[in-house]
Amino acid sequence: MKPVTLGPFLGMNNRLPAEKLHVAREGDFVRSAVNGDFTAAGTFRRRKGFAPVVVGTSTHSLVGFDDIGLVVEENHLCSLHKEEDGTIVRNAIYTVTQNLQFSYTRAPLAIYASNGREFLRIDRDSVLPVGLPSPDEPRVSAIGGGLPPGVYQVAVSYRDASGRDSGVSLTARIELPIGGGISIDYAAERPAADTILYMTAPNGDQLFETNLPGYSGQVITALPAEGARPVAMMTAPLPAGQIVRYHRGKLYSAAGALLFFSEPYGLELCDLAENCIPFPEPITLVEPCVNGLYISADKTYWLSTDDMKLTPVLPYKAVGGTGNVRRDSEEVWWMSTRGLVRGDQTGTVENMQEERVAVSPAMYGASLMREEDGEKQFVATSFDPRQTVTAARAWIDAEVIRKETQL
């Protein structure tokens, strides 16, 4: 039998029939490659195996940051820390709804995690639900005192021990025709937080913090020193979403087909009427990239955060859960329903696979960036993929595994 020399290998190509996989003076494509790596030199090598370091039950939503890992096991969100001897320590830090996938993002002061129901702020010392509830409108009444005559407006908010502010309540109005004082009564039930009181000068329209400690009853009989203006008027807690991302001082949360974004540097507060972008279908991708965000719903868009202009860039969707960032470049990557896509900081995208590889469409997946032996790779896996009809069919659509040897 005449020997046949293969190579250099040009990568995978399932669009060509078997007799067309050889390219004269260039090399050879392969129809399918499993557990192998193509190198830049055109060679092919088996991928190294692995050994488990942590074993769990019903685990999902694994993520790694520089100083901490997070994973969900059954109904607990767990932290992962590496000890000096290399062992991985797992600790349950919060009880969550079972079987809901988490999305994570790192902001300057905390990690935010959301599964569409629970929305959490994770820092070194605590795990807290995102957003304090806004208080009810306070009840005010006139009493004796030394306030000048005029119309006063009064509102309240909450502030917890970590310095987080809630939204500001509706404003209560009271008129003191001959002056006097104001008695303010707050709601009996409130979170474990201080109540911050705001009021206006007589006949004024600007609220200011009174710098008086809050408690269940407040009496003002003289004008207090003017403190800071409230920054959370007409806001509510940022809604929980299936995707959460941080970009340029704002937190973005994709809840179904709605993309909510926080107030600037008020990461847990959102003007629900103004800070929301609706899409025709549920959102499957939100990935920041320097000057904007890539968003996928009915198609894939580029949202410029300089002018909040939304521009379609691809006529098809991203596979949920597959967005990732290359730390050594200003690029983001994701799996689409037509293969691997790369996007840069200007909103320019490129499909890296569609010309040669017909992928099996899927609704959800996971991804990671991998670098080993000088090779940089984007690795993605899809859950419940559907059979593609665009690949060449003249081959055996199966992997034969026998005696623990993959053929």
Image (cartoon, rainbow, N blue to C red):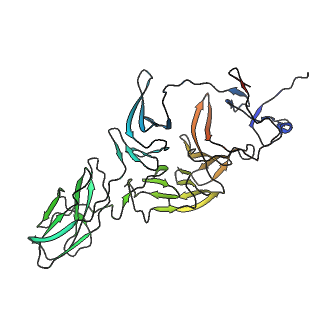
Q: Position of residue 107 (x, y in %)?
A: 42, 46
Q: Is residue 324 left or right of residue 237?
A: right
Residue at 52% across, 51% down: 290
- Viewer-side residue, 201 vs 79: 79
Q: Answer yes or no: is residue 69 visible.
A: yes
Q: Quadrant of the N terminus?
A: top right
Tell me if residue 251 comes above or below residue 45 in the rendering: below
Q: State the image quarter where residue 376 is shown.
A: top right
Q: Looking at this rendering, what residue extends furthest in the right direction?
A: 1
Q: Answer yes or no: is residue 38 visible.
A: no
Tell me if residue 177 comes above or below residue 387 in the rendering: below
Residue at 54% across, 63% down: 309
Residue at 64% across, 46% down: 362
Q: Is residue 273 left or right of residue 403?
A: left
Q: Position of residue 80 (x, y in %)?
A: 43, 32
Q: Position of residue 386 (x, y in %)?
A: 68, 45
Residue at 78% across, 31% down: 8
Q: Is residue 400 left or right of residue 278?
A: right
Q: Is residue 30 left or right of residue 219?
A: right
Q: Quadrant of the C terminus?
A: top right
Tell me if residue 340 comes above or below residue 238 in the rendering: above
Q: Position of residue 274 (x, y in %)?
A: 44, 65
- Total numbered labels: 0
Q: State the image quarter where residue 128 is shown.
A: top left
Q: State the image quarter where residue 50 is shown.
A: top right
